[in-house]
Amino acid sequence: MSASTVTRPPASTPTAKPAPRRRPLRPARVVLHLFLGAVAVGWLFPILWAVLTSLRSYAYTAANGYVSFGGWTFDNYVTAWQTAEFGKHFLNSVYITVPAVLLTLFLASCVAFVIARFSWKLNIVLLGLFTAANLLPQQSLLIPLFRIFTEVPLPEFMSDSELLYDSYWGLILVNVAFQCGFCVFVLSNYMKALPRDLYEAAMVDGASIWRQYWQVTMPLCRPALAALATLEVTWIYNEFFWATVLMRTGDKFPVTSSLNNLRGEFFTDNNLVSAGSVLVAIPTLVIFFLLQKQFVKGLTLGASKG
């Protein structure tokens, strides 16, 4: 009795994927890449020039000009930190930025929820009112706001001057007022894209309007809130105009306004000012890189469906 030999088919070797075909190098593509490269260089040039200038001594640049290389030193950063008292003014910026951002996002989300959730006659008018506020130049309100701030009283525990003028609360309120419009516009459009079935199911379960806002809407808006928080921290932290107008006590200035301490009455060391500007910019860069994932995710919401 002969045993039959079972032959197995040879194992199929995996076929190699064809290499992706490179797009032909066309003149239009070359021009586009050159244009994008030039825009990137033009965008980065001021930052790189400020960093380069901050790392050089003023004596060397005065003798050889700014278009030269040499005279490298870190003394400008030490001098800028000590002269402008950045440690204290960084805390002032925290006192102003954190409450302003939290209050702006909370108030804007409340208004956006009303605009997106309810249908009434003044719905579009309310959204247009908040959006139009961003189109008004802030400088045009300088005189009336200054007069209001010098006449509105505050308790002594809230302001040393007992006025809204020269207080942290004044800067917080003015930043909230000018930033709410943009946040309302973004959040209202995002909330309108949420399924209405969620609210109908919440109403069936007996959820109140507040619970629909806080427990249903707000958790779903976390990506949008993270993106807005990144932008608002950058904008409010870098705000310079209102702090110099509505503050008179130098110890209360935020860090951006404290850069004025690096300017002399008859002479300004540009190397020292560049070092101070780089120090001021570091916190915003750190915040952006820490929240970069949430920021990009919030910006790309609704870009594709399905």
Image (cartoon, rainbow, N blue to C red):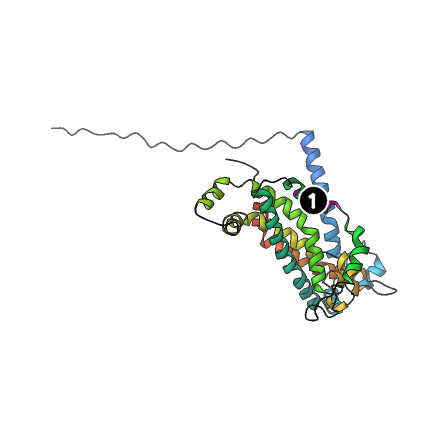
Q: Residue at x 59, y 46 (%)?
A: 114
Q: Which residues are magenta?
A: 127-135
| In the image: residue 104, left or right of residue 48 | left
| SS at mark 1 in the image | helix
Residue for badge 1 = 129
Q: Residue at x 65, y 53 (%)?
A: 232
Which picture quadrant has residue 39? top right
- Residue at the far right: name it: 266
- Residue at the far front: name it: 121
**Is the N terminus in the top left, top right, bottom left or bottom right quadrant?**
top left
What is the magenta segment's predominant secondary structure? Answer: helix
Between 269 and 84, the residue placed more toward the observer is 84
46 to 153, vertically: above or below: above
Q: Amino acid at mark 1?
A: Leu
- Residue 75 position in % (x across, y down): 74, 66
Q: Residue at x 58, y 42 (%)?
A: 116
How many other residues sit within 10 Å of disc 1, few (<14), some (14-19) or many (≥20)? few
135 to 170, vertically: above or below: above
Q: Residue at x 63, y 41 (%)?
A: 123
Is residue 133 rendered magenta in the image? Answer: yes
